[in-house]
Amino acid sequence: MKLALLSDIHANFQALEACLEHAESAGARQFAFLGDLVGYGADPVAVIDKVRDLVAQGALVVKGNHDAMAVTPPVDAKHLGNSTAQWTCAQLDAQQKDFLDKLPLTLQYQAVLLVHASLDGPALWRYVSDQRAATASMDAGAAWPDVRYIFGGHVHLQTLYYGGMGASLMKFEPTPGIAVPVPRHRRWLATIGSVGQPRDGNPQAMYAMFDTDKLQLTFHRVDYDYQAAATAIRRAGLPVFFADRLERGQ
């Protein structure tokens, strides 16, 4: 069975649609969303409604920090990253806010554990950006003895970590479209990248596919109309920085 993993959509409906179409054509039979459905982008309503429809069909979802902020936005947005929370909150109806508010921080699916940030305090939104942070997250995963795979987002980059001979995890930079064997005798942790706001200098959307039968993980990059997504941000009156970065992929 192929499990499509999508994170950090950030209200980018164009990117979401492109990734879903790509995943379905590649044989995805289950979908998992790893947080930050909203924030930054101009289409939070369309994104939430699409994800809710997929949840009704069995999709899995966990909460991200921007999902939490959209329900209870900061009164004084001192950081640019928080500056769209009040606008996003104003776009959502009560049911959409309730959907975000009730999302779990972690969710187990077979031998897979889903989380937005680090398992080492998931509500603290720590970034898993190096081997040390990945090891802390993996060590926290010991509370789920059946889990061999931890999948998250938050860092907007595609990286794979695995248990080696030492105490810390080894870091692996995947090549898009190339399946990576992930046998169960090792421990694995992956940050699957961002659907709606890549930050590696490439504007293509990101997602990953886990084949639970072949035990292979494939990271994907997908073309989408990022110009349309950027134009929507500008038309909504949101900070132009978020439109500019879509076009640069940064």
Image: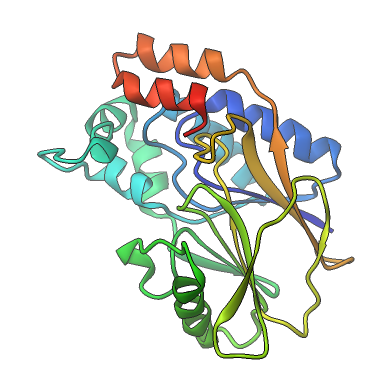
Q: How many marks?
A: 0
Q: Is residue 132 visible?
A: yes
* Quadrant in the rendering for residue 93: top left
The residue that appears at 49% across and 39% down in the rendered structure is 199
Q: From this viewpoint, which residue is outermost toward the left?
A: 76
Rendered residue at 28%/45% (across/down)? 69
**Image quadrant assignment for residue 104:** bottom left
Measured along the vertical axis of the image, is residue 77 above or below residue 46?
below
Residue 188, image x, y percentages: 66, 73
Name the residue located 84 percent from the left edge and 59 percent from the top edge. 1
In terms of depth relative to the viewer, which is nearer, 59 or 15? 15
Quadrant assignment, res 43: top left
User: Which one is in front, 152 or 51?
Assistant: 152
The location of residue 187, given as percent across then percent down, is: 67, 80
Q: Position of residue 75 (x, y in %)?
A: 11, 40
Image point (37%, 31%), residue name: 40
Q: Is residue 97 left or right of residue 155?
A: left
Q: Is residue 24 left or right of residue 47?
A: right
Q: Is residue 42 visible?
A: no
Question: Residue 90 placed where, x, y %?
Answer: 26, 27
- Colouring mode (rainbow / by chain / secondary structure / one colour): rainbow
Q: Nearer the viewer, residue 153 or 72?
A: 153
Question: In the rendered image of this protein, does residue 29 appear above or below residue 112?
Answer: above
